[in-house]
Image: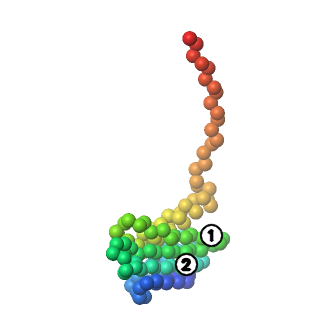
Amino acid sequence: MRTPVRVSFQGTALSAALRGKVVEFVDALEKFHGRLTGCHVVVKAPDRRHRTGGLFEINIHLVLPGNLEVNIDRTPSLDERFADPLFAVSDAFRRARRQIQDRLRRQRGEVKSHRPRRPRPARRPAKQ
């Protein structure tokens, strides 16, 4: 792994196991893309004051060569699976991989472009 990874935890203590998983996911992204120039991951723990919720939020900021940035900062609000921090991290990195795939397709020109539509000739009114 050549990319320095910064992992920040907000609202919870530092978890070595979760940090290790984040590093594994970044390694997998590097194998997929080839090279990342920067990575910052923020793990936000749920507030303990609310009766409902309790979902982890994962924010990922990746910088690719050519100053391309990939930001993942949305967590589905009504999905109880995000109460598990490992699921939240894996889902965020899955979304990051998908965004990188889309960017690479656009760079390579593999995105399908549609031909402009030709206007249809006007219909003649029916004879009565």
Q: Nearer the viewer, residue 116 or 51?
A: 51
Q: Residue furthest right?
A: 66
Q: Which mark is residue 85?
A: none
Q: Is residue 93 left or right of residue 35?
A: left
Secondary structure of the residue carrying tag 1 is strand
Q: Quadrant of residue 47?
A: bottom left
Q: Which residue is mark 2?
A: 39
Which amino acid is tagged 1? Leu
Which amino acid is tagged 2? Cys
Q: Is residue 62 left or right of residue 91?
A: right
* Residue at (51, 70) in percent of width and height: 72
> Where the C terminus falls, by quadrant?
top right
* Residue at (59, 74) in percent of width and height: 63
Q: How many marks?
A: 2
Secondary structure of the residue carrying tag 2 is strand
Q: Which residue is mark 1?
A: 68
Residues packed near mark 1 inside 10 Å, few (<14), some (14 to 19) or many (20 plus): few
Q: Nearer the viewer, residue 115 or 72?
A: 72
Q: Residue furthest top?
A: 128
Q: Is residue 47 left or right of residue 112?
A: left
* Residue at (58, 63) in percent of width and height: 103
Q: Are marks 2 and 1 in contact (CB under 8 Å)?
A: no
* Residue at (57, 16) in percent of width and height: 126
User: Where is residue 24 drawn, in percent x and y?
Assistant: 45, 79
Q: Nearer the viewer, residue 27 or 78?
A: 78
Whether residue 55 appears in this view of the structure is yes
Compare marks 2 and 1 and give the one earlier in the sequence: 2
Residue 17 vs 52, above or below: the answer is: below
Residues packed near mark 2 inside 10 Å, few (<14), some (14 to 19) or many (20 plus): some
